Amino acid sequence: MDSSQLFGIATIAYILAMVAYIAYLAFRNSAVGTVATTITIAGFVAHTIAFFVRTAEFYEVGQMGIMRAIPLTNLYESLIFFVWCIILGYLIIEFKYKTKSFGAFITPIAGMALAFIDLSGIHKEIHPLVPALQSNWLLAHVTMSFLSYAAFAISFSTALMYLSVTTEDKKSGPYIFWTVTLGVFVSILVAMGIDLLAFKIVATRPEEFIKSYLFRATFRSGSGIIVLLSTIGLGAIIYAAYSYGHLLKKVITSFNISKDMLDDLTYKCIAVGFPVFTLGGLVFGAVWADQAWGRYWSWDPKETWSLITWFVYAFFLHARFLRGWKGQKIAIVAVIGFVSTIFTYLGVNMLLTGLHSYGAQ
Amino acid sequence: MFSSIKLAVVVFTLISVTSIIGTLIQQQVEPERNIQMLGKIFGASAPAVYKVFSTLGFMDMYRSWWFLSLLFIFAANLVICSIDRLPGIWKLAKEPVKPLDADIFKSLIIRPQVQVKAKLSDARTSVITGLGKIGFKHVLTDETSGQIYAEKGRYSRLGVYVTHLSILFILLGGIEGKFFGFDGYLPLLEGTSASSIEARDGKQIPLGFSVRCDDFDVSFYDNSDTPKSFRSKLVVIDNNREVLKKDIEVNDPLRYKGVVFYQASYFFSQDHVKDAKFILKVYSKADNKSSQVDAGLEKLTEIPGTGLSLKIQDFSPAIGIDDKTGQLMTYANQMNNPAAFIEFFEGNKSIHKQWVLKRFPDTWKTPFGSVELVDIWGVQYTGLQVRKDPGVWLVYLGCLLMAAGLYAAFFMSHRRIWLRLHEEKGSTFVTVAGSTNKNKIQFDQKIDSFIKSLQQ
C-alpha cells in the first residue's frame, strides 16, 4: 500500500468519526463515544503509518540517510503533517480532559482538509533536497516548528471560542475583535483553497508556493475584476461573521464546552507550543543557520517575525503568571499571537523581501 | 525604574514595532530599492522620507545605536526583574520539604481517609513503595507528628531564571562576536588563493594565513538542474606550509584558527575559459588503454599513443537546444550542462569534430574510442562566507541553558506530598495532603494511581 492510499483511509476515518461524535453528542451514549474515539484513533494510526511510508519513499528517492528523508519539504506534505498535528493535539485533549465535545469540531476539519488536499490536484511528487536543506537539523527544526504552529492554532481556536461565549454586546470591542478576526481567517482559508484548485500547485517547497501562488487566484490576481470581487467577498465574509457571530456561542454551549475549559486549554496549548517553538523554531533554526551560513542570527524578516511572535507569547505567559490576566484580555493576546504566527509563516515570504527563499542559493 | 514590568512591555513593543519597520525596509541595500518601495506608499515625497529614515539609521537599523540600546535596556530589565523576584523563589528552591502544622495539613488535604486493608506497619511499607512508583524517591518520616512526607522537582522552580539567564548569555555572545569577530565574503577562482576577505563595508580583512581552492564541483540530481551538492577542495597555507586540507560543502564548513569558511555560492566566469584546463579521459579503441589529456581552448594537444591530436574549438557552460529554432544554445550562465566542441586531427588534417557533454556519456563516443569530458578546471569561482566569532560558544551555551530552563519551567513541577496514617479495626486509614506549583491534573492522576497501588 502506498502512502496516498493510507492518507485516503485516514480521510474516511475522520469523516466517519465526525458522524460518530455528533451522534454521541445527540444521544449521550458512552458506547457511541467509544466508537467515535476508536475511529479517530484508527484514522490517526493510518495517518501516522502513511507518514512513515512516505518517509521510506523519500528515503528511496533521496538516498541521503534517514535523518534527511523527512517528508516535509513540499506543500502537500506540510499540509498533511499539519492535519496530523491537529489530530494529535485533539486526542491529547480528549484523554487529558476526558471530554469528547471538541471531536465534532476537529474531525470534520481534519477530514475535509485531507480530502481537499487530495482533490485539489496538488502535486505529490517527492523532490530531492537542495544542498542547503541537506542537514540533520532539518528534521528537528521543521517538525518542531510545525508542532508549535499546530499548538498555537488550537490555542487560537479555543481563544476565539472563549471570546464568542463571553461576549454578548455586538458593539463591544471584544465582540468586534473576534468576529472580524474570524472573518479574515476564514477568508484566508477560502482564498488558499481557491489557489490550490486553480493552480494544482507544482511548487516544490511551501515557501515557493507562498511566494508564487498564494492569493494569485484572488487578491493578487492579474485581473482587476477578480481582485475587486475577492475584496467584496472578504467584506461579505467579515460582515457575515459579525452578524451571525452570536450563533457560534449557541453551538459551543450546546456542545457542552465550558468557558473555563476553553481558557485553560488556550493556556495549555501555549504552554506546550511556546517551549517547542523556542527550541525547535528559534534555537535549532539558529544553530542550523550557524552551521550552514555562518550566522546564527541575521535579522532576516523570517527570523525577525519569529522573534516578534515569540515576544507576544512571552508576554502572554508573563501577563498570566505575574499579573494574573485571565478571560477576555488573555484570549485576545492569544489571538494576536496566532495572527503573528501566520504572518511569520505566510506573510513574510509573500510580502517581504528577505535573504531567503529558504534553500535557494 | 528598570525593574518595572511596564518598562518591559514598552521595550518589548518598541523592539517589535521597530523590527517590523526593519523587515519592511530592506537592510543594507542600495538606496534605490528602498526609495522605490517607499514610493509606493509616499509617492513623490519618497526620497525625502528615505532621507529621514536613513538619518534615523533604519537602513541598517539592527546595528544602529538606538536599536542596540533597546536590546540593552531589555537585558537590564530582564536582569533586574529576575533579581527582584529571585530571593523569594531561591528560598523555595533551597528549602527542603518539612512536616506541616496540623491546620496547614488540613487545608492541603486532597484525599481524606483512604481505607487500606492492612496493618499499620504493612501499610507504611506499601505507602513508601507506592510513593517511589510515582516518583518520590526520598521519603521521610517525622516521629513527633507521625507524618510521612516527600517532594520532587524542587529545583524546577529555578527554570524560569535559567531561561532568563540563557537570554543574557545569548546577548553577551552576540556582543562579543560583534566587537571581537568579523565576517565577510570571499570569491575564490579554482587554482587561486587569497589571504584576506572582503567585509560588508568593502574593507579588506587580513586573515593571517591564506586559503587556496584546488577544485570546485557541482553535482546534479539525474536529468535535472537541481544541484545535489556543491563542494570546494580547500587548502589552508600558514607560514608557507600546507597545514589543513578539507572538502567543504553546504552545511559542512572548514575551521582554522577560529575562522570558519562556509560554502555559500558559486559562479561561472566566461573570462577564464581561454586559460581553462579541459581534462579529458580518452579510451583508445586501438590499444584499449585510457589516458588523461589536458587540453585547452584552441590549442592542439596530442593524444598519447594514438598519433592523433585534438583541439577544443568551442565551449558552452550549459548547452541546450532552442525549442523554436532547433539550434544549439547556451541556456544558463552557470555550468549546468558543460559541453566542449572537439576537433580531431591526424597530422594537420582535420578528420572529425563533435560536441562532448560532461553529463551525458552517450556523447562521449567517437570513431576512435570514447572521450570523456571529466572537468573544465579554472573557470568556476567558489563563493565562501567567512566568519570569525569568538562569542559563538556563549550563544551555544545560552541555547543549552535555554533548553534546560524551558524544560524545567514548562514540563517539570515542584510536587510535595504529606501523609498521615492511623490504624482502626485492622485497617489503616491514609490521609493525603499535597501541593504542586503546576500541572494539577497530572498530579491528580499520579495520586489516583498511588491510591490504587495501596488498595491492591
Image (cartoon, rainbow, N blue to C red):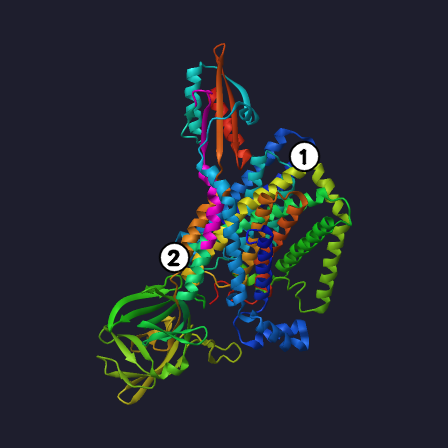
Q: Nearer the viewer, residue B445 or A314?
A: A314
Q: Is residue B227 left or right of residue A188?
A: left
Q: Which residue is mark 1?
A: A25
Residue A199 drawn in magenta = no
Q: Please, what secondary structure does the residue beneath circle 2 have?
A: helix
Q: Which residue is mark 2?
A: B393
Regarding residue B425, the answer to whether it shows in the image is: yes
Residue B157 drawn in magenta = yes
Labels 2 and 1 within one chain: no
Q: In the image, residue B281 lies at what x, y percent?
A: 29, 74
Residue visible at 52% across and 61% down? Answer: A204
Amino acid type assigned to the residue bearing label 2 in the image = Trp
Which chain hosts label 1? A
Q: Is residue B158 left or right of residue B370?
A: right
Distance of mark 2 from mark 1, alpha carbons?
56 Å
Vertical placement of residue B452 versus B61, above or below: above
Q: Which numbered disc, 2 or 1, marks the residue closer to the eye?
A: 2
Q: Nearer the viewer, residue A149 or A54?
A: A149
Q: Please, what secondary structure does the residue beneath circle 1 have?
A: helix
Q: In the image, residue A59 lies at what x, y percent?
A: 42, 53
